[in-house]
């Protein structure tokens, strides 16, 4: 009998521990007491005291994120060709000029094509540009009838009328509430957007589709997941921007929401050409501290989205306290460049307090580099942005990108880039 009980116990144990990964804690009283890795202490325990020290410490932290969280990008041996497929001088009644640029990634006979949709103010040469992935196709971000829709795999979505993993006309303009392009351009900014699935379709396909199929390297526990692939794609869009005479590559602001907010943080950390980074509701694996285990946890994200991170990240399922880094260090990798983190009050899954605390604990790096970190250690009231070189706000409402969020990002960027308000 005892043997049978022991046998049954071991049989259900994996199920219990798996189920544990799914139970989200939303009770502040149950947040474990934790100690964060000190961003200004080297792995060997010595202190980081100077800017020069920080460069070395930054490498240490970057390497850990690469090998333990997002995965290492293998060497790219292919080439990329850009083609302007459409141009319109008077989009939105003349407010903007519009371009669609196709990037063809090629390696031997393997090819992946990615479409970049760009709106620029008429006087565009110095306009800061928000570069941001969209979730469901470029045509969902605008009501303009002639913007191309993706022919790559898209997730089925009732609101967008997608049932066969192919985009169709029903999606046109369906995401405009997240893309106030006219307001953005009217304030002197540009927008460049790409459907993220053009780079890598967002499902667990064993890395056989998307950009990864153009790389020849064998996979191991440090190999890149989809977030690293999407981030890499943003750097390739940046390569294009550097060649576009209508754009200023020194004024590109990475902006991303949710999984694409995680992506924008990693892209900003990986590629110092991005002048500013905005993380909107990025949560677990993005701006939120993992050790708080509040809302989405490492175990939960790795189970639901096994293709987003490298396999090593799974070692920390239910063991966040063993992680050699935490997410405040991801923000610190962006220093001294400005970073804006935003939360939504009802988006507990993304742990607003954990997102805020990351900003607090990344601040000493900004200060070491002579910049202002987050100006307060106290969580601000709703809709009351805090802005140093790290900025933060929490607004009422759900997980989303709203006109208020955009207004805050534009105010912050207008100050930084000294645009007229
Ligand atoms: C899920 C996931 C989050 C992610 C979000 C999104 O909720 O658990 O980590 O941020 O999707 O991208 O919308």
Image (cartoon, rainbow, N blue to C red):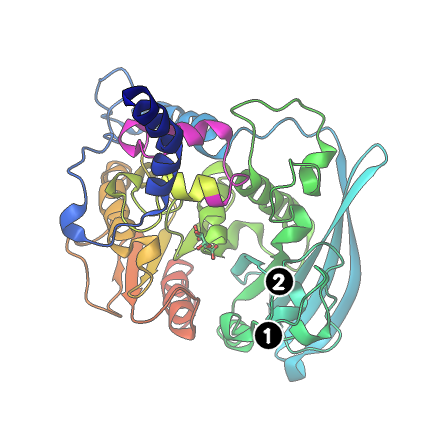
- In the image, the segment drawn in magenta is 304-325
Tell me if 165 is positioned left or right of 235 in this view: right
Front-most of 340 and 167?
167
Q: In this orientation, does residue 51 appear?
A: yes
Q: Which mark is residue 136?
A: 2
Q: Pointers 1 and 2 in contact (CB under 8 A)?
A: yes
Where residue 58 sits: x, y (%)? 37, 29
Structural crowding at the residue carrying mark 1, measured as other residues with C-alpha within 10 Å and reported as few (<14), some (14–19) or many (≥20)? many
Say which of 239 and 204 sits in front.
Answer: 204
- Disc 1 residue lies near ligand 1 with CB under 8 A: no
Measuring from the top left, give residue 312's x and y in whole percent: 46, 27
Near-viewer residue (202 or 93): 202
Decide if residue 367 is on the left or right side of residue 120: left
Residue most toward the top?
44
Q: CA distance from mark 1 to mark 2?
A: 9 Å
User: Assess mark 2: CB under 8 A from ligand 1?
Assistant: no
* Residue occupied by mark 1: 174
At numbered mark 1, what does the secondary structure look like: helix, strand or loop? loop
**Image point (27%, 15%), residue name:** 44
Tell me the quarter of the image containing the C terminus.
bottom left
């Amino acid at each position: 009998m005892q043997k049978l009980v022991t046998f049954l116990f071991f049989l259900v144990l994996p199920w219990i521990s798996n189920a544990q990964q799914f139970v989200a804690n939303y009770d502040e009283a149950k947040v474990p007491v934790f100690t964060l890795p000190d961003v200004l202490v080297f792995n060997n325990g010595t202190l980081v005291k100077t800017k020069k020290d920080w460069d070395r410490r930054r490498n240490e932290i970057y390497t850990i994120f690469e090998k333990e969280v997002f995965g290492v990008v293998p060497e790219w041996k292919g080439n990329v060709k850009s083609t302007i497929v459409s141009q319109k001088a008077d989009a939105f009644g003349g407010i903007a000029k519009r371009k669609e640029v196709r990037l063809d990634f090629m390696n031997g006979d393997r090819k992946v094509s990615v479409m970049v949709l760009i709106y620029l103010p008429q006087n565009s040469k110095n306009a800061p540009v928000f570069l941001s992935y969209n979730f469901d196709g470029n045509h969902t971000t605008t009501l303009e009838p002639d913007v191309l829709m993706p022919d790559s795999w898209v997730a089925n979505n009732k609101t967008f009328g997608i049932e066969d993993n192919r985009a169709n006309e029903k999606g046109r303009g369906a995401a405009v509430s997240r893309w106030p392009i006219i307001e953005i351009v009217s304030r002197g900014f540009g927008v460049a957007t790409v459907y993220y699935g053009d780079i890598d379709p967002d499902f667990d396909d064993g890395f056989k589709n998307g950009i990864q199929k153009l790389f020849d390297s064998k996979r191991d526990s440090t190999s890149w997941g989809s977030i690293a692939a999407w981030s890499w794609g943003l750097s390739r869009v940046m390569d294009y921007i550097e060649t576009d005479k209508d754009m200023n590559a020194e004024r590109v602001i990475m902006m991303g929401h949710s999984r694409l907010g995680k992506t924008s943080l990693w892209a900003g950390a990986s590629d110092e050409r991005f002048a500013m980074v905005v993380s909107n509701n990025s949560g677990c694996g993005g701006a939120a501290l993992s050790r708080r285990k509040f809302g989405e946890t490492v175990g939960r994200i790795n189970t639901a989205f096994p293709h987003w991170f490298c396999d090593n990240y799974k070692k920390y399922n239910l063991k966040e306290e063993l992680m050699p880094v935490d997410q405040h260090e991801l923000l610190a990798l962006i220093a001294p460049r400005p970073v804006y983190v935003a939360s939504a009050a009802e988006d507990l899954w993304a742990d607003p307090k954990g997102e805020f605390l990351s900003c607090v604990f990344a601040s000493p790096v900004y200060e070491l580099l002579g910049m202002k970190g987050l100006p307060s250690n106290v969580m601000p009231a709703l809709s009351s942005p805090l802005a140093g070189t790290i900025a933060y706000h929490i607004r009422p409402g759900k997980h989303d990108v709203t006109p208020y969020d955009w207004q805050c990002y534009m105010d912050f960027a207008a100050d930084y880039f000294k645009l007229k308000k």
